[in-house]
Amino acid sequence: MSPLSRILDSYRNFLVPPPARGQDVCVTCRRATDGFKRCWQCNRHHQAHGTGLADEVVPISMAEKDKQLMRALSQYKNSTSDEVRRRFTNELASVLATFLAKHQDCLGGFDLVTVVPSSQGRTSPLVDVLERRISRTSARFARALTTESQNTREMRPDSYDVVIDVREKSVLLVDDTWTSGASLQSAAVALKRAGSARVVGLVIGRYVDEPVAGVTAPFDWETCTLCA
């Protein structure tokens, strides 16, 4: 078995497929809503910014509190060990590369790939992954956004500066974790204000603090939230 196959088999054991769209699932982030169209946070964002938000948000997996995916998403950038950071970065790069290889068409095509910039003044490891290590994104990657704002879990699009020309471009906006969604959606609003034609948010893990209910099928690399 190849190293990539080992990683994908390992992750398939703990990745959680996002729930299919329905009356009890947020149309934006896939969190449970008890019958509402959007969860409380996504509804607040929609009321304030409407079509200025990302046109689509695609979580690869739900990320349950204290479970293995959240550990990987934390340790790949926060571990004090270089070896641990490298290991989890390599694994998450494999997850992203495999998902894009199988579902690029589902995302609708994109002219530009960029990341939600870190709110802590650091360069996200995703920059290196998307700019250098994934062939499907490297030629289209650009550091389109900057911010000096701290993450307050509140919308702050005025705190994001678009530093390249994005007019009429379709943008794939990548982040590792969606918690409140405020960072990705603030970046999406900034891109739309700068003239982007379309913004699709892609996140590795949609954080939830309780086990995801109603998901019975195992994770399947061949299926995403858009083609399910």
Image (spheres, helix red, strand yellow):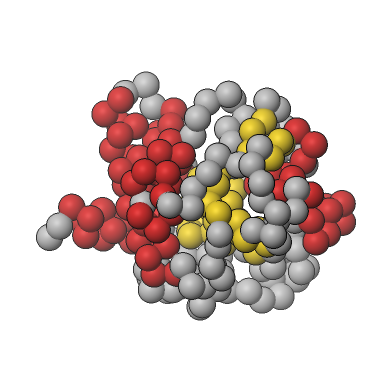
Relative height, residue 54 to residue 77 (above, below): below
Query: Which residue is pictured at 62% across the width and 30% down the height?
Result: 119
The image quadrant that residue 46 belongs to is bottom right
Image coords of residue 19 (percent x, y): 56, 69
- Whether residue 68 is visible, yes or no, is no
- Whether residue 125 is visible, yes or no, is yes
Q: Nearer the viewer, residue 88 or 116?
A: 116
The image quadrant that residue 80 belongs to is top left
Query: Which residue is pictured at 75% across the width and 53% down the height?
Result: 195
Total residue callouts: 0
Q: Is 14 left or right of 224, judged from the image as shown?
A: left
Image coords of residue 35 (percent x, y): 75, 71
Image coords of residue 28 (percent x, y): 68, 62
Q: Nearer the viewer, residue 146 or 83?
A: 146
Image coords of residue 225 (percent x, y): 54, 70
Relative height, residue 92 to residue 81 (above, below): below
Which residue is situated farthest in the right direction here? 47
Query: Which residue is pictured at 75% across the width and 33% down the height?
Result: 159
Q: Is 9 left or right of 117, judged from the image as shown?
A: left
Which residue is situated farthest in the left direction here? 1
Q: Nearer the viewer, residue 131 or 34?
A: 131
Screen quadrant of the N terminus: bottom left
Q: Is 223 left or right of 181, judged from the image as shown?
A: left
Query: Which residue is pictured at 39% across the width and 69% down the height?
Result: 102
Which residue is situated farthest in the top direction here? 80
